[in-house]
Image (spheres, coloured by chain):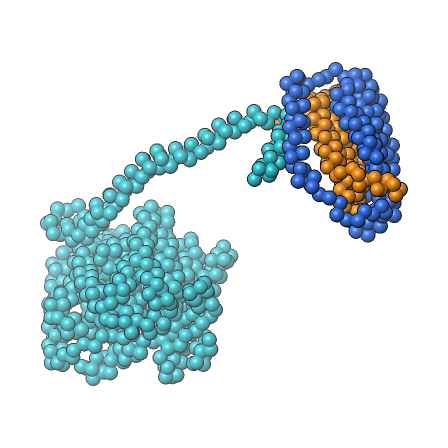
Chain colours: A blue, B orange, C cyan
């Protein structure tokens, strides 16, 4: 099983790097989708089946399609030549590396945490999530609908021809 | 199912931490690296997902469903964010006929 | 606290009436028609006079010595607990009666005097506020309320002296009065702070109860009394802080009457009489007061000899009379001082209102060299002025005689020398008052352009009332020598503690009175011979005169000495502070801060270029630094 973990992880890292470094937007999107599918595998490994399904539906089914739509709508599917200067790009990579190290240092203390609780395979299922969502988190859940409405209104406002 | 769940115990938690930190750093590097606004948005998604992965891992290891509910909420926010972000990109393309982030230098005013 | 005497709680009405009057006249300033403000203001003061009389009878019939009326808790912080309370006893009642009674007459008189002034409504508002402050001063049950009234009086005097503010000289006079008062106030407030420091209270009752246990001549008491004395010297215009009072003549004449007769300058006397227990225990301060009072009385009387402005003469006579009061205070004869305050209030108000009537008749002319022959033109003013002049000169049976004689007798009991000097001052007073009187009313009219006429009834009636008071006011306190019972003194003895002094033989007393009377007669005759028979008119301002005459006419160059001693060095210091310290140090420091900020701004401005990717970098760098900081710390 640990083999599965390393496989998925490798796919994810490679795809993520390709998202950053490949120049064609369409390719970017496809790499990102692959990355997300690998992540859904991780969710299943973590016994979070509901999240895995929702992740596939929301991210690959909705968000990435939205990206593709926009790319095609704006006719951006050719490789874009615009690039940042070399200095910027090098410094971006260096900064990313430093950030990685610093974050690792910051999270190092959590490495010692062991699974203290008896493992419960039920929590990742629809019923487990649903019970928590509609009891403890009912109010945030309802409020998130307002967030969606406002996001929708905002998107339409921006998208109108002469806003 | 039983097999899968027992399999989790074999993978140490720090592996997930390591993975999500790596993903987050890659996403952040991409944000700094790219000039294409749509690519920057995609890198943002990458960062979101690394956090999601971490939350799910902790939730599973602690048998606490709250973490997974949080992931659910993060997805909601990400969806809203992408909708607004992409509409901004559309408007930007329409107004300055480019999606180069360096053209958005009006934040001075 | 429930007052023990029925109806004594009405005392709050006394200051409330003028306050209401002030509020009405000042708020409805533009709405009030002609004379309405004056009538409202006068009614309010008269009402509080009636209340005071009522209180007077209540207190007398109750058989008690004092009553404290606490309105509300005013300050309560730590040790400091100061209720807003009134103390009604015989001393404050006398002062309340003087203030409201004389004040009401002056208010009524002002209706006629200020008839044509365009800011008459503000005038009455300020007069009411003045009365209110003074009532607060005398009614307060602790030093802090007294201080509120004290400052209120100072402020109102500033407003009223500078009432005709379009004249820069008047403004200057108002400012001078204010600043000189401030000098005194500084001593006064330091004294109050020291009082609180020593006794942990500023309430009269508590302070006096505690002070009575102290040793006589205790250094702390001497210091407190000296500091309070500084305040009294400023407010009551004693040497060296007296020069503001003659300059305060810039205000309208009723204001002068109010300041000089009923309020303001008597505040210092009142305060010391109120603190009589403290002053009895501080012999050094008492001696200082004797010296100050006597010096002031004589010097200002001499200065008064050479003044030609009718109001200035009266002003110097006020300062001189205040000197007598201070002398009495220093001698420990507090009730004598208050008695002199009372009679002085009668005849000085009369003198000032009479002078106002004369000035009114002469069309604003104040120079006595240009007056003359007003006797037949203004009979009522002439008669009342005559009564006041006789009263201030101290001729029996007019009121001034009784009070002044009381002080002189006390002086003789202490030392014949004091008596001689005090009598000398009284003689000079008599001379210049009759000089003024003869010059104004006798001889030929010297200013042809003026058409003197008697003043309207609204002005003459207060004059008549006051002249009756000046005539008979002395009978309040007929000494034992004339078969009286010293009623006023005994009345006040319940509130103030006078020092016991040795009795003198009644034959000696009669002898003293005879001496002073005969001398007064000679002086009056001398004045008559000089100014009526020879009809001498004082020389014009520019005329050559002897050195002494010039010194006297210029009030001993006191203003100039002040200028040289205080103003010049202070001015130079200010100049130095301005040119060197402010311009070079403070300004450049302030400018430097500005320059530094704008330079830094220029530097940092480059960071703000509006480029999003740069901002992103900055953000990441910030987060990095933050995490590193957390990890390290």
Q: Give residue C504's position: percent from left, percent from top.
A: 14, 79
Q: Is residue C74 left or right of residue C314?
A: right
Q: Residue at x 71, y 43 (%)?
A: A113
Relative to C331, is C562 above or below?
above
Q: Give residue C176's position: percent from left, percent from top.
A: 30, 51
Q: Is residue A12 left or right of residue B3?
A: left
Q: Residue at x 87, y 37 (%)?
A: A53
Comparing B19 with C577, the one in front is B19
Q: Give residue C344's position: percent from left, percent from top.
A: 26, 68
Comparing C500 with A138, the one in front is A138
Comparing C243 with A28, the one in front is A28
Q: Residue at x 36, y 35 (%)?
A: C585
Image quarter (top left, top right, bottom left or bottom right) of the N terminus of chain B: top right
Residue C124, visible in the rendered structure: no
Name the image quarter holding residue C281: bottom left
In the displayed orientation, state which residue is furthest to the front: B10
Name the image quarter holding residue C583: top left
Q: Residue at x 23, y 55 (%)?
A: C240
Q: Give residue C283's position: percent from left, percent from top.
A: 21, 68
Q: Is residue C249 left or right of residue C324?
A: right
Image quarter (top left, top right, bottom left or bottom right) of the C terminus of chain B: top right
Count the marks: how many? 0
In the displayed orientation, state which residue is furthest to the right: B1
Relative to B21, is C54 above or below?
below
Residue C5, visible in the rendered structure: yes
Q: Is residue A23 left or right of residue C526?
A: right
Comparing C50 with C331, the one in front is C331
Name the image quarter holding residue B30: top right
Relative to A113, is C382 above or below?
below
């Amino acid at each position: 099983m640990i083999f599965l973990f390393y496989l998925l992880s490798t796919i994810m890292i490679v795809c993520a790097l390709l998202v950053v470094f490949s120049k064609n937007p369409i390719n970017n999107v496809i790499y990102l989708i692959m990355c997300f599918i690998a992540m859904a595998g991780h969710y299943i490994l973590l016994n979070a089946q509901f999240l895995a399904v929702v992740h596939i539906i929301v991210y690959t089914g909705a968000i990435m399609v939205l990206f593709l739509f926009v790319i095609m709508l704006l006719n951006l599917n050719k490789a874009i030549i615009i690039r940042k200067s070399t200095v910027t790009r090098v410094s971006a990579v260096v900064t990313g590396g430093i950030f990685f190290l610093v974050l690792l240092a910051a999270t190092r203390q959590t490495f010692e945490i062991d699974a203290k609780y008896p493992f419960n395979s039920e929590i990742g299922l629809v019923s487990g999530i649903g019970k928590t969502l509609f009891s403890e988190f009912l109010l945030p859940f309802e409020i998130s609908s307002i967030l969606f409405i406002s996001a929708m209104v905002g998107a339409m406002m921006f998208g109108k021809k002469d806003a | 199912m039983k097999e899968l769940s027992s399999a989790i115990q074999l993978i140490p938690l720090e592996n997930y931490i390591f993975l999500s930190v790596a993903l987050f750093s890659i996403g952040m590097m991409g944000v700094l690296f790219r000039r294409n606004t749509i690519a920057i948005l995609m890198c943002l998604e990458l960062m979101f997902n690394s956090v999601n992965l971490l939350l799910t891992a902790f939730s599973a290891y602690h048998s606490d469903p709250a973490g997974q509910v949080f992931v659910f909420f993060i997805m909601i926010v990400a969806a809203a964010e992408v909708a607004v972000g992409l509409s901004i990109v559309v408007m930007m393309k329409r107004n300055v006929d480019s999606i180069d982030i360096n053209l958005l230098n009006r934040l001075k005013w | 606290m429930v007052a023990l005497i029925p109806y004594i709680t009405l005392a709050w009405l006394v200051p409330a009436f003028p306050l209401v009057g002030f509020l009405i006249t000042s708020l409805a300033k533009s709405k009030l028609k002609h004379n309405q403000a004056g009538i409202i203001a006068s009614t309010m003061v008269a009402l509080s006079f009636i209340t005071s009389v009522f209180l007077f009878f209540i207190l007398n019939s109750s058989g008690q010595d004092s009553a404290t009326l606490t309105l509300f808790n005013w300050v309560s912080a730590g040790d400091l607990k100061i209720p807003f309370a009134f103390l009604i006893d015989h001393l404050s009642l006398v002062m309340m009666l003087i203030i409201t009674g004389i004040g009401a007459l002056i208010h009524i008189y002002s209706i006629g005097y200020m008839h044509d002034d365009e800011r008459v409504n503000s005038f009455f508002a300020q007069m009411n506020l003045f009365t209110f402050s003074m009532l607060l001063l005398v009614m307060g049950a602790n030093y802090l309320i007294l201080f509120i009234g004290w400052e209120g009086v100072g402020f109102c005097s500033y407003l009223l002296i500078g009432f005709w503010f379009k004249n820069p000289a008047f403004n200057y006079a108002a400012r001078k009065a204010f600043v000189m008062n401030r000098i005194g106030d500084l001593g006064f407030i330091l004294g109050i702070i020291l009082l609180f420091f020593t006794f942990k209270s500023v309430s009269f009752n508590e302070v006096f109860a505690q002070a009575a246990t102290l040793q006589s001549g205790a250094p702390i008491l001497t210091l407190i009394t000296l500091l309070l004395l500084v305040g009294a010297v400023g407010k009551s215009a004693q040497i060296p802080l007296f020069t503001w009072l003659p300059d305060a003549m810039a205000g309208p004449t009723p204001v002068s009457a109010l300041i000089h007769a009923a309020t303001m300058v008597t505040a210092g006397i009142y305060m010391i009489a109120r603190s009589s227990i403290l002053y009895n225990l501080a012999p050094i301060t008492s001696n200082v007061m004797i010296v100050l009072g006597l010096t002031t009385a004589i010097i200002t009387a001499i200065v008064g000899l050479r003044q030609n402005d009718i109001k200035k003469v009266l002003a110097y006579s006020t300062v001189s009379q205040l000197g007598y009061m201070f002398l009495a205070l220093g001698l420990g004869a507090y009730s004598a001082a208050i008695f002199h305050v009372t009679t002085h209030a009668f005849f000085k108000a009369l003198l000032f209102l009479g002078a106002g009537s004369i000035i009114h008749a002469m069309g604003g002319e104040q120079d006595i060299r240009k007056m003359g022959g007003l006797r037949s033109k203004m009979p009522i003013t002439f008669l009342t002025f005559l009564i006041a002049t006789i009263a201030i000169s101290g001729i029996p049976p007019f009121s001034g005689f009784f009070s002044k004689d009381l002080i002189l007798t006390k002086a003789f009991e202490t030392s014949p020398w004091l008596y001689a000097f005090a009598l000398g001052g009284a003689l000079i007073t008599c001379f210049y008052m009759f000089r003024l009187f003869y010059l104004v009313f006798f001889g030929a009219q010297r200013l042809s352009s003026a058409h003197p006429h008697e003043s309207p009834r609204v002005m003459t009636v207060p004059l008549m009332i006051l002249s009756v008071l000046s005539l008979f006011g002395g009978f309040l306190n007929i000494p034992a020598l004339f078969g009286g019972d010293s009623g006023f003194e005994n009345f006040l003895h319940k509130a103030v503690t006078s020092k016991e002094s040795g009795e003198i033989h009644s034959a000696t007393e009669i002898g003293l009175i005879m001496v002073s009377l005969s001398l007064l007669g000679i002086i009056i005759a001398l004045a008559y011979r000089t100014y009526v028979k020879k009809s001498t008119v004082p020389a014009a301002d520019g005329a050559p005169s002897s050195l002494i005459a010039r010194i006297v006419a210029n009030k001993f160059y006191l203003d100039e000495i002040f200028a040289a001693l205080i103003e010049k060095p202070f001015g130079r210091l200010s100049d130095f502070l301005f040119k060197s310290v402010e311009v070079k140090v403070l300004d450049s420091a302030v400018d430097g801060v500005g320059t530094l900020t704008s330079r830094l701004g220029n530097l940092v401005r480059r960071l703000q270029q509006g480029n999003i990717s740069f901002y992103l970098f900055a953000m990441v760098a910030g987060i990095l630094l933050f995490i590193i900081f957390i990890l390290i710390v």
